[in-house]
Amino acid sequence: MNQHGSGAPLDARSVLLSNSDVDVGIMTPDQDDQAFLANNDGDDLYYLHEGSAELQSPFGTLQAHPGDYLWVPRSLPHRFKLQGPALWLHLEVKHGLRLPAQ
């Protein structure tokens, strides 16, 4: 992790809370991912508080803006192309993200 919490999304993560199920943190990326990455440890959930981005994966490209949530399943290759500096909430859910029964 970058000492200042900036850089590409992977390097801009600062974990605030962690347990055996989930890591919760903030991200302040200001550079694009240079390569596709895949998290084999858990599902990733991003909430974009500030800044817009393009999420690229084998499924296609998705535009995301402030107020959007992005779910990236475990092991899905992806990368972010930023549209300016950002402030995001990040959750790494180690045992899979599931929607609650309704």
Image (cartoon, rainbow, N blue to C red):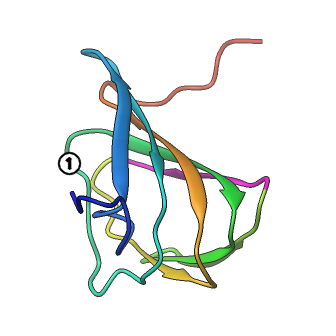
Name the residue nearer the viewer: 75 or 65.
Answer: 65
Name the residue nearer the viewer: 40 or 59.
Answer: 40
Location of residue 95 with respect to 87 vertically, above or below: above
Q: Position of residue 43 (x, y in %)?
A: 38, 41
Q: Position of residue 4 (x, y in %)?
A: 32, 61
Q: Residue furthest front?
A: 4
Name the residue nearer the viewer: 34 or 27.
Answer: 27
Q: Is residue 97 left or right of residue 64?
A: left
What amino acid does circle 1 point to? Asn
Q: Which residue is mark 1?
A: 40
Q: Position of residue 83 (x, y in %)?
A: 63, 85
Task: Please give the name of the residue rendered at 30% of the width and 63% of the height, measured from the top-left corner.
Answer: 10
Start-end of magenta stretch: 67-73
Q: Position of residue 80 (x, y in %)?
A: 47, 76
Q: Is residue 61 left or right of residue 38?
A: right
Q: Quadrant of the N terminus?
A: bottom left
